Image (cartoon, rainbow, N blue to C red):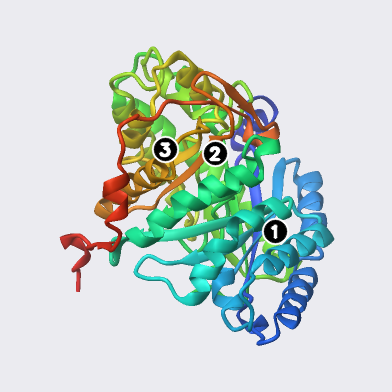
Amino acid sequence: MYNQKNILETIEMIDKQHLDVRTITMGISLLDCCRSDPKAACQKIYDKIARLAQDLVRTGEDIEAEFGIPIVNKRISVTPIALVAGASDTEDYVPFAQALDKARAATGVDFIGGFSALVQKGMTAADRRLLQSIPEALASTELVCSSVNVGSTRAGINMDAVALMGLIVKKAAALTADQGGLGCAKLVVFCNAVEDNPFMAGAFHGVGEGDCTINVGVSGPGVVHHALQRVKGAPFDVVAETIKKTAFQITRMGQLVAQEASARLGVPFGIVDLSLAPTPAVGDSVARILEEMGLEACGTHGTTAALALLNDAVKKGGVMASGHVGGLSGAFIPVSEDEGMIAAARRGTLTIDKLEAMTCVCSVGLDMIAVPGDTSAETISAIIADEAAVGMVNSKTTAVRIIPVPGAKVGDTMEMGGLLGSAPVMPVHPESAADFIRRCGRIPAPLQSLKN
């Protein structure tokens, strides 16, 4: 139960420390929308989303007003569209993305995710059609997000899909060149994707989920940073305990919002994702938390250890606050969306290689990274393969959201605005990985996959 001290502390977190609920995400199954006629399928998709989510935004705004808790985004995730569109007699899946965008506009939500395919072990004809449709789908819609799962600990890594994704990322950048390649900011390539992630751009509604659920993603890097300022110079045991207690309070707030939204919408409560999701605002940075532990700059030696402590303590505190913790849950390190990460990248302390090491111990992976526009498709595929290998071997979710900014070179900045922030263009290794990527086939699952 909350006491008066807890309530006052939470009010201060909201007022002064950037605490918010980052998203209420409604997950919707579209499996019953499969039709052989693609126009009929798209209409069923629109009708179901518009019906189930018609009150989502209003409900979120009501909860925000009544409880004084900022709710930044209201979002929708749907069944991977490759599974739905596969029943339709069509080669072109772009209309399915446009149906999603139309439903998104009708409901007023901020993003809709699920133009997705799960190809960790192989690709069906439907999967391949969806992958080939991604660039045009992202260019012809406003707020539709796409994801592709190319590997898992149980299946290994589908290198055919990895090779194809490098080409798809490049094409998505080219088709949105007038926006600096912004289409790529709506595309995530996963290993070990989870079915209940409420965060974009990687959210989709897994086939193991119910017909409709409410998932909530909380945030709060600023709150953790502020808490650590009170224990300067203390041993790491004290640091970990401080983060755990703070994560508990953050998650309790998310649990409250999730339960309220569930009850008011008449939709089952799914999970609370307790990830620390930063923003470009000063005081809301994961990088600054790591620096508060004693690092001169994020990316220097010791950064991976500091991040490991943070991620573990966040999870331990969060799981005590809710019986339904899920999603990704941990610390996000998106470069363009974190003021401290942006500063470290510009300084040259934070590199793609260091970020890859950091992803071994935190949530997700190489996120919102801008690279030169002339970066080859094979290099992008190799970066995806490296990150997928980290996830596969360590039995964790990893991902790549990379933007080859057309016409940009190292040192330039891509301005995206809002929560997407600004991305300093980071260098990649000039040596080629083309022959490696051309091998294709499948990297076998590691020994730890044999758990039965």
**Quadrant into which the C terminus falls:** bottom left
Residue 345 in the image: state x and y as whole percent. Answer: 46, 21
Question: Judging from the image, what secondary structure is the residue with disc 2 in?
Answer: loop
Question: Judging from the image, what secondary structure is the residue with disc 1 in?
Answer: helix
* Residue type of the residue flagged with mark 1: Glu
Residue in the image at 44% along x and 57% along y: 164
Disc 2 versus disc 1: distance between alpha carbons?
22 Å
Question: Judging from the image, what secondary structure is the residue with disc 3 in?
Answer: helix
Do the residues under discs 3 and 1 have CB atoms within 8 angstroms?
A: no
* Residue type of the residue flagged with mark 3: Lys
Answer whether residue 440 is visible to the viewer in this image: yes
Q: Which mark is residue 244?
A: 3
Q: Which mark is residue 245?
A: none
Which mark is in front, 2 or 3?
2
In the picture provided, is 126 more to the left or to the right than 428?
right
Answer whether residue 320 is visible to the viewer in this image: no
- How packed mark 2 is, by other alpha carbons closer than 10 Å (few <14, some 14-19, many 20 or more), is many
Q: Nearer the viewer, residue 89 or 341?
A: 89
Which mark is in front, 2 or 1?
2
Disc 2 versus disc 3: distance between alpha carbons?
16 Å
Do the residues under discs 2 and 3 have CB atoms within 8 angstroms?
A: no
Q: Nearer the viewer, residue 15 or 84?
A: 84
Tell me where residue 307 sits by quadrant: top left
Q: Which mark is residue 277?
A: 2
Q: Earlier in the sequence, mark 2 or mark 3?
A: 3
Q: Earlier in the sequence, mark 3 or mark 1?
A: 3
Q: Earlier in the sequence, mark 2 or mark 1?
A: 1
Residue on which the image places disc 1 = 260
Residue 183 in the image: state x and y as whole percent. Answer: 63, 46
Q: Residue furthest bottom?
A: 36
Disc 3 versus disc 1: distance between alpha carbons?
25 Å
